[in-house]
Image (cartoon, helix red, strand yellow):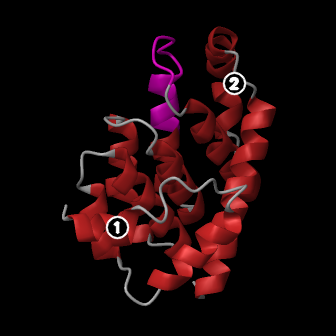
Amino acid sequence: MADEDLRKWVQPFYLKNLVHEMVDFIAAVRTIREEVSPEIAMMLLANFNWRPRITAGYFAAIWNWSELVSPIGRLLLRSDVCYAALGYCLALRRFNSRQSVDYLVEYLEYYLARLDLRFDQSDAMAALGQLDRENGICERDRLLPLWQEFANNTKLNLIQSDQLFERQYLTILDAARVVGS
């Protein structure tokens, strides 16, 4: 990826705290709203680097590009770069499809059983919990025993994870309203 692309599509977004820097994040989104596209997101997803990938997840979530559910879901399952999964989970949550739920469940079934791999299980659990509540399903409930064993070894707190993810997701929705998507 060219330096110019990184400066335009990645740097203004990837280090923004979606809760504490919401205003700056949304202002940055506003500056690219006329130019960003699913093709740009795919270009970012093709990079073997978490920065472009998390940004692509944010963009897909903000503009609700559900046609990216498969590429994003497959990248979540691969977990081949750190940190990017927050963007993937936000996008899958926003897409709110059966396919989104299936990717989150598959990810959690594998990664919750891997006590040696602490990745983004809490974000995936939070996204799945929101989808369960919104759609009247109970996928997360059946994963709670796996979560409990995983959380006991990692000291993660599901209530805190749910609350943080919810605040991050609300920033995505605020950004979507600002850009009219």
Range covered by the magenta-colored residues: 105-118
Front-lying residue, 118 or 17: 17
Q: Is residue 9 left or right of residue 171?
A: left
Amino acid of disc 2: Leu
Front-lying residue, 128 or 79: 79
Q: Which residue is mark 2?
A: 144
Residue with the most extreme left position: 2
- Which secondary structure lies at badge 2? helix
Q: Where does residue 16 sit, x and y in percent of width and height?
A: 57, 56
Amino acid of disc 1: Arg
For label 2, the crowd category at 10 Å Cα-Cα, with few meaning under 14, some 14 to 19 and many 20 or more, is some
Front-lying residue, 93 or 161: 161
Q: Where does residue 126 sit, x and y in percent of width and height?
A: 67, 42
Q: Which residue is mark 1?
A: 7
Q: Where does residue 97 sit, x and y in percent of width and height?
A: 53, 60
**In this rendering, is residue 93 above or below 30?**
above
In this rendering, the count of numbered labels is: 2
For label 1, the crowd category at 10 Å Cα-Cα, with few meaning under 14, some 14 to 19 and many 20 or more, is few
Residue drawn at x 60%, y 40% as measured from the top left: 123
